[in-house]
Image (cartoon, coloured by chain):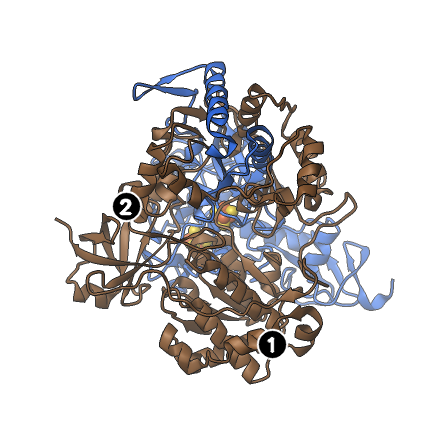
Amino acid sequence: MTNTIGCIEKADVILVTGSNTTENHPVLSSYVKRAVKFRGTKVIVVDPRRIKMSRFADIYLRQNLGSDVAWLNGMMNVIIAEGLHDQNFVESRTEGFEELKKTVEKYTPEYVEEISGIPAEKLVEAARLYANAKAASILYCMGITQHSHGTDNVKSLANLAMLCGHMGIEGGGVNPLRGQNNVQGACDMGGLPNVYPAYQPVTDPAIAKKFEDAWGVTGLSTNLGLKVTDMIPKAHDGELKALYIIGENPLVSDPDLNHAEKSIKNLDFLVVQDIFMTETAELADVVLPAKCFAEKDGTFSNTERRVQRVRTAVEPPGDVWDDWKITCEIGTRMGLPMAYADSEAVFEELRTVTPSYAGITYDRIDQVGIPWPCLNVEHPGTPILHRDQFTRGKGLFHAIDYTPPKEQADDEFPLYLTTGRLLYQYHTGSMTMKTAGLNDRAPECIVEISPADAATYELEDGEKVEVASRRGNINATVQISTTAVTGTVFIPFHFAEAAANKLTNAALDPVSGIPEYKVCAVKLSKAA
Amino acid sequence: MTTENTISINGNGFSFKPGDTILDVARKHDIDIPTLCHLKGATPTGACRMCVVEVEGARTLLASCATPAAANMVVETESPKVVETRKMLLQLLLASGNHNCAISGSAGSDWTAFQLKVHKDDGSDELCPVWGDCHLQELAYRYQVSGEAFDSTEVSYPMETVNPFIVRDFSRCILCGRCVQACNDVQVNNAINFGYRGAPTKIVAAEDKPLKDSDCVFCGECVQACPVGALVEKDARYAVRPWETTKVRTTCTYCGVGCQVHLHIQGGKVVKVTGVEDLSPNFGSLCVKGRFGFDFIHSPERLKAPLIKKNGQFREATWDEALDLVADKLGSIKDAHGADSIGVLTSARVTNEENYIANKFTRAVLKTNNIDHCARL
Ligand code: SF4
Ligand code: SF4
């Protein structure tokens, strides 16, 4: 997030898109709901499902799946046409406005209505509301990123925020909500194929040299590595021979699972390090047992970049180790001595090579976490990014055209499917499914369908139905709900025995490598 | 100090800011005015009247949580009149339900009959599930009262136990309204409210449905806010006693909000989770996963030793054996096919330190940049 969670309550307008906030970030959603209730903050929800947050919204817009660039360009079209943009901000803080202006010119509300299904006058209303706010915050999540053009979607949101000067101010910002406890930290720490910790590019020889010196090694690679979504096909083709998987379960979370499973089975060697025997671990040659969060010390970085402590509360169940210690032992055996007294010692090392964490120490975050960048031990941390300038200096507008999603509904697969999470389960369920109460609330895979679609396909609430796409099929229980919009069904991806990702499309965003989980075409038929 | 913004409490002068209530000023200076219904961050309701104080010139006692401090106000927080009122309020509350800890009084002849009846209602022969962790009990001790001063009132509504997370025991509910505010004003889930206004009032969900059939999302904000034993975590009820537990503060392991939690440990196990009050980012709030989804920690299905697969079957191995094998295999694959034939998936689930080490291992040991994680999936 460019801003903090607390900052949400200071916004006059909040645009929530592609985030089922009340179910996936419940505590954060209460900031939005309180703002509405006590400050009269106006909320705009743009989502393919009539999610609970829409009850708190002044304007609810339902876009066709994958039409986000179109409606965002449409909002900018209105804003520029009516002169509602922040001319000062655009002039002094950004570049590329003219190109943007040219690109969005054709996205008139009427044209956008054709693509997105959003009524023209509603779009105009939303555009005015957002632009006229003193401070408007954008909250988004996987509904924006999990598309074959997800990067374009994110850039379009940034365009909109910069255009209206809702950046670098209290109550503003473009705020991605991270779905997992330490996505932020995994990225910050160089868990990405193109960057070292603090996003220092691997292709820069000077950076490589810096890390060679810090780590006492030579020959660090300056080639871009493989993204997870490249690794799977490479494993399939036999180019990738071995995988070392730490705490992930790609065999439920990857797109087009049937293909992913074949690929992983094709590896010469698979090591999985986890707390449970997951679907992925079953396929491993070696399984290494790790401690869970309650058994270890360390830090997580939350969605607002706040680095917070994790503390040991209980003993692990057997002879299981910290993840860092296991990895260090393998590294040492392979020739690079990696020995640390404890997690704090690791942290002390990482902050010397991670400028944005340089000023953070366990002592300083004992009570309250600090949001990075925190450049030295006197630095208070940075709750709001881009206050005076953007990372690259001026903010760059990206002129982006709409391209349709990779798969369209047709006669054979007449319905759209979008996937996501439920309040009562988490990710692949390996943790939440151990709590009986959570299973009681969300026991099995459902397919959420609108009353009209249920009538068309003659389906009853609670009945089993087969859902098929071009890639596979699963059985799920029908849940008729007014949250669903006719023509689009929703399936949560938590359930391995009815894995939604057997259906989803592995078409990737060319930049981020994120698959198009949010759009594919399916058909329903009564389960045999 | 100018007299325009000075208030006298128990004979001492304090300055205040416009908008401060008497309670705010008192709390700021460690003067302990007792409250039951007051919930930080929510608008004061004055429902419980426990915070009444005597203000010079006022005809009646005033609820300090709802009375703004005013210039030259003279306040007594523990005057005989105040204490007498608080005593009576507490006695009425204690007589109003199954308050079967010692404070209900044990001198009367019908004590045994009362205990037996409560045991039957509770389905347990223990004292109240929050005995020792109850605000009402604390105040009863402080003001040395019991429940015997008034005839005990009938319990009007049966307990609700049909959801997996929260037991609602209306017999112990004192109708302070903290749960209603927690649900409506803090979490804004709008699931519960006062129902059947007039006697006998009940906190109801929807049209007095069980929580599981209402808008309730089992965030448990109401449980954490309840000052007595009316709302208790189902699994912690009778099983968790505060004097047998220790608390460790850490960060929730589910979503990216990073709520600060207290893990309550009893007998080496996590038995309950509560939100850390007063601190960002969650100020005490949690969701159903963060509060109730901790069973996986002690699941019998946890992996307990390294495993090596031989002929399609896993067998347990020592760490040395497993680590040697992994190092060996990765080393020989690297030699035979090059560093880029190996990939590492690190995790959005593990700590920064562990991600850093995974990054260092991949780059400095394997000598490849093939590292990613699945979190964007
Ligand atoms: S658990 Fe949460 S949603 Fe349910 S009644 Fe309590 S506060 Fe409201
Ligand atoms: S308690 Fe809920 S909202 Fe808070 S971090 Fe955990 S999962 Fe997220």
Between A31 and A142, the residue placed more toward the observer is: A142
Residue A452 appears at what percent x and percent y? 22, 68
Residues packed near mark 1 inside 10 Å, few (<14), some (14 to 19) or many (20 plus): few
Mark 2 chain = A
Q: Picture quarter containing residue B297? A: top left
Q: Is residue A510 above or below residue A208?
A: below
Q: Secondary structure at mark 2?
A: loop
Please give the label number shown on residue A98.
1
Name which of mark 1 and mark 2 comes first in the sequence.
Answer: 1
Instruction: Give the drawing colour for chain B.
Output: blue
Q: Secondary structure at mark 1?
A: helix
Mark 1 chain = A
The amino acid sitting under disc 2 is Glu
In this view, the mark in front (1 or 2): 1
**Residue beneath label 2, please?**
A444
- Left or right side of B23 for A402: left
Between A411 and A36, the residue placed more toward the observer is: A411
Between A523 and A103, the residue placed more toward the observer is: A103
The amino acid sitting under disc 1 is Glu
- Left or right side of B273 for A210: right
Between B364 and A177, the residue placed more toward the observer is: B364
- Which chain is depicted brown? A
Residue A238 appears at what percent x and percent y? 38, 35
